[in-house]
Image: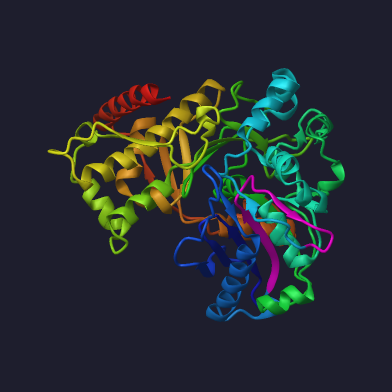
Amino acid sequence: MRTLLLGYDIGSSSVKTTVLDAESGKVVVAVTLPKEEMPMAAPKRDWAEQDPELWWKYIQDTTREAVSKGNIKKEEVKAIGISYQMHGLVMVDASYEVIRPSIIWCDSRAVEIGKSAFEAMGSDYCLSHLLNSPGNFTASKLKWVKDNEAENFKRIHKVMLPGDFIAMKLTGEIFTSETGLSEGIFWDFLENGISSPLLDHYGISSSLIAEAKPSFSEQGKLSTKAAASLGLSAGIPITYRAGDQPNNAFSLNVLEAGELATTAGTSGTVYGVSEKPVYDPASRVNTFVHVNHSKEKPRYGVLLCVNGTGILNSWLKKLIGSSVSYEEMNEWAQEVPIGSEGLTFIPFGNGAERIMENRTVDAHLNGLNLLKHDKRHVLRAGQEGIVAALTYGFDIMKGMGLNLNTVKAGRANMFLSPLFREAFVNMNRVVVELYDTDGAQGAARGAGIGAGVYSSPKEAFVGLEKLLEIHPDDKLSAPYEEVYQIWKEKLSLIS
């Protein structure tokens, strides 16, 4: 009988369910839904909300489809792992019912709350204890609810991150993780526990915060009710949980100091591991607890995030015509030279940007010549602008002492584009290694470690295949450096 591991990846665009064969490390079946992007509500400017029950619907739908397509026998699945979109706020009442839509990662309504807290509590405390400004993270979003939706706030039994909510639906129990508490900016790194000064400042009771479990550990068992809705056996343990960026790093076997991972999905990120609690004084990049952190062997994840990445490419696709494929878009973009003949795209059009100190800069197309530029130039400028924004964040990380020489990525999303890969490698002068993996596979491998199916991370990465290694080209690096310098000049004019 096979030993199978099930991994969930709950994004803001889609939910992916993957079943992995533990012995070979190969995918048995993977299902992603919906086929179009999940709806995201924006009741006001810079707001972004989703219904948590929608995530649960697609967890059920993808699992049932995976069980059917993969010929999965119930007794073969030994553990479940969860990866999820970071920083979202989910609130449930005493009956475990959702109180209001989730305020998700790209929602900017709490920017001023976090900024005021940083000033009032002082940079010395925030940077030494929280390693961040409270910023626009989960704790500040909860404070926004307290200030603006008093009746909803009174009903709260527990607050959760999106992955905690899915785990609750699977098990009927409410837990979180240390890495999750740190991503919500609830965690005091010096005290190694919840930050009482932050909760006191916001007037939030610690009773609203769920108990934390290690990322690799049993965090409840699949309930009879959930098992029936998924087509699985009751009692399967949930043994891994992490936000999408720590999990993406884990999926690429990025666990030790100096190692780096990158993604370019809806948002674009670079995630570096440090053994020291480093921070950016302006909190433009952020430090969290990594999945393998412990008191004895500390590991911190330093996250650079650009909101407007794949979402810009998706917007361009809709603008040109939904019948056009991303492959066609990439081919058109490569028909024009590096620099898009003077056209520059600033991609910050998806809420407040952390690398811009939580300002809403918006997206800008600069230098448009109606007699020269066409859709090919716009498409190329979009990809070059995304890479330039990531490079801007890279520079901040370098200033923190992180070594940025080799970066690992899954061969997915924007990294499917040869142009994007070329620009990323040469603008940053780094080597990129592309692997056949994704967040759902990472969650499945994590579940294997947490359940004891694998005795070590090394054993868990059996079957992880490097597909491609891309090196900078001196002939291309210089023109891409010029693109970056022009991009920074344009950014300075609007910011």
Near-viewer residue (248 or 266): 266
Vertical comparison of 296 with 68: above or below: above
Specify whether 65 is left or right of 213.
left
Say if the magenta span includes residue 93. yes
Is residue 20 shown to the viewer in this render? no
Specify whether 111 is left or right of 265.
right
Residue 353 coordinates in the image, percent (x, y): 51, 34
For the point 52% across and 68% down, which residue is it? 30
Q: Which quadrant would residue 289 be assigned to in this image?
A: top right
The C terminus sits in image quarter? top left
Near-viewer residue (184 or 304): 184
Q: Which quadrant would residue 339 be assigned to in this image?
A: top left
Is residue 166 shown to the viewer in this render? yes
Vertical comparison of 123 with 138: above or below: above
The N terminus sits in image quarter? bottom right
Residue 178 coordinates in the image, percent (x, y): 75, 43
Specify whether 199 is left or right of 74.
right
Residue 104 coordinates in the image, percent (x, y): 60, 49
Residue 317 coordinates in the image, percent (x, y): 33, 54
Near-viewer residue (66 or 125): 125
For the point 62% across and 54% down, which residue is it? 84
Q: What residue range appears in magenta?
A: 77-96
Say if the magenta span includes residue 159. no
Name, please, the residue furthest toward the left. Answer: 371
For the point 68% across and 36% down, which residue is it? 299
Please state the total of marks drawn on the protein image: 0
